[in-house]
Image (spheres, rainbow, N blue to C red):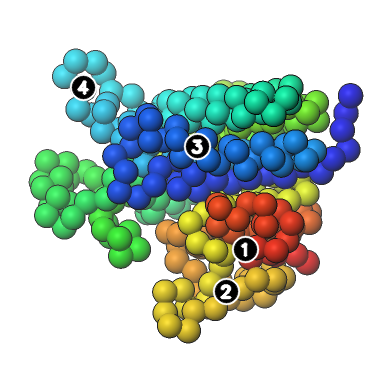
């Protein structure tokens, strides 16, 4: 039976999986996910058709480190394959946690993770200008030590929070598995897809080839939401919404705003490229491409964000 209930794409920020100052153990990440899936299960039981996109910045960085440290024993895998690994691992814990919570509530809704590829342009200038932070934060001393051993890496300051490794982040063009995801959602499955922004691939005539990059998960979520004709794109993060002059004494939350107004602020440089900038861009693109509503809100305010009472609500 095909449902007519509108589709909502949820883009989960890193705080849904790993909190700052945590070590990143399996147990820590699983417990964080459980608190998030409890909120999502409520939406599913209320009749929403949900697609979940999640970040993987800390996890892919940790995976790359594991491969590099283990290369004397086994060959390390390329960055795009590390992205596939984290999609599987994080999809597994989200899928299991959400399925268990739905079962506890008596729901039989299926939950499925799709290992997702996202097409990028091999001539994207992003490949020459790494801008996506991954992995742990370093002090300046740790950064200097790391670069002495690995001069090929790009390690720069990340929004005043410390130093991180930066990799290319090309713009997403197309979700390869978009049609399969749409069919699953139409048939009432809850789908986890485009994890970490999806595995970046380029077209080589009739075949696809992975490339060394990490796609921004919010921009990938917009591509997915648009391709499956979602009504809402909800981007969940660790702040209450989009602020002007964030962190200053006169900061101001933008509660309700049009995409054109939001774009004007973006063009004036209000939103940092490494944090709020991509979220704002994803919201603007979604509304331009036919979406009805984009929301940027705190993870803990998911219910209010859906109801329109929390976060930054962007509508035409």
Which part of the image, by quadrant, shows the N terminus?
Answer: top right
The Cα–Cα distance between marks 2 and 4, rounded to whole angstroms, is: 47 Å
Q: Residue at x 22, y 43 (%)?
A: 152
Q: Which residue is mark 2?
A: 253
Residue 223 in the image, given as x and y percentages of width and height: 65, 45
Instruction: Please determine whether, in this image, residue 125 is positioned above or below residue 256.
Output: above
Residue 74 in the image, given as x and y percentages of width and height: 24, 16
Q: Could you tell whether 18 is left or right of 171 in the image? A: left
Which part of the image, by quadrant, shows the C terminus?
Answer: bottom right
Q: Nearer the viewer, mark 4 or mark 3?
A: 3
Q: Which mark is residue 33?
A: 3
Residue 236 in the image, given as x and y percentages of width and height: 57, 52
Of pointers 3 and 2, the one earlier in the residue sequence: 3
Q: Residue at x 56, y 67 (%)?
A: 242
Residue 257 in the image, given as x and y percentages of width and height: 69, 72
Q: Nearer the viewer, residue 245 or 131?
A: 245
The Cα–Cα distance between marks 1 and 4, rounded to whole angstroms, is: 45 Å
Task: Rate crowding at label 3 as few (under 14), some (14 to 19) or many (20 or more) other CA atoms within 10 Å.
Answer: many
Q: Are marks 1 and 2 in contact (CB under 8 Å)?
A: no
SS category of the residue bearing label 2: strand
Any part of residue 114 in sight: no
Q: Are marks 1 and 4 in contact (CB under 8 Å)?
A: no
Q: Which residue is mark 4?
A: 71
The Cα–Cα distance between marks 4 and 3, rounded to whole angstroms, is: 31 Å
Of pointers 1 and 2, the one earlier in the residue sequence: 2
Task: Rate crowding at label 2 as few (under 14), some (14 to 19) or many (20 or more) other CA atoms within 10 Å.
Answer: some
The Cα–Cα distance between marks 1 and 2, rounded to whole angstroms, is: 8 Å
Q: Which residue is mark 1?
A: 311
């Amino acid at each position: 039976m095909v449902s007519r209930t509108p589709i909502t794409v949820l883009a989960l920020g890193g705080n849904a999986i790993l909190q700052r100052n945590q070590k990143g153990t399996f147990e820590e990440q699983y417990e964080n996910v459980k608190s998030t899936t409890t909120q999502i299960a409520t939406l599913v039981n209320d009749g929403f058709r949900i697609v979940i996109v999640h970040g993987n910045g800390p996890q892919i960085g940790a995976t790359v480190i594991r491969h590099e440290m283990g290369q004397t024993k086994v060959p390390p895998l390329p960055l795009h394959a590390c992205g596939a690994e984290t999609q599987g691992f994080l999809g597994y814990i989200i899928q299991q946690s959400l399925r268990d919570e739905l079962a506890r509530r008596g729901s039989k809704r299926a939950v499925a993770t799709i290992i997702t590829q996202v097409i990028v342009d091999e001539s994207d200038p992003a490949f020459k200008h790494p801008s996506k932070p991954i992995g742990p934060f370093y002090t300046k001393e740790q950064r200097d030590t790391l670069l002495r051993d690995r001069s090929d890496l790009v390690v720069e300051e990340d929004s005043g929070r410390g130093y991180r490794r930066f990799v290319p982040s090309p713009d997403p063009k197309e979700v390869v598995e978009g049609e399969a995801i749409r069919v699953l959602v139409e048939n009432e499955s809850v789908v986890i897809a485009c994890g970490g922004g999806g595995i970046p691939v380029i077209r080589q005539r009739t075949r696809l080839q992975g490339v060394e990059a990490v796609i921004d998960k919010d921009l990938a979520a917009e591509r997915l939401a648009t391709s499956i004709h979602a009504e809402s794109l909800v981007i969940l993060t660790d702040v209450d919404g989009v602020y002007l002059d964030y962190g200053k004494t006169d900061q101001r939350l933008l509660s309700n705003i049009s995409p054109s107004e939001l774009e004007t602020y973006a063009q004036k440089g209000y939103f940092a490229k490494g944090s709020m900038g991509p979220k704002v861009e994803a919201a603007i693109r979604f509304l331009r491409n036919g979406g009805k509503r984009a929301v940027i809100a705190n993870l803990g305010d998911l219910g209010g964000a859906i109801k329109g009472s929390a976060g930054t609500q962007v509508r035409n």
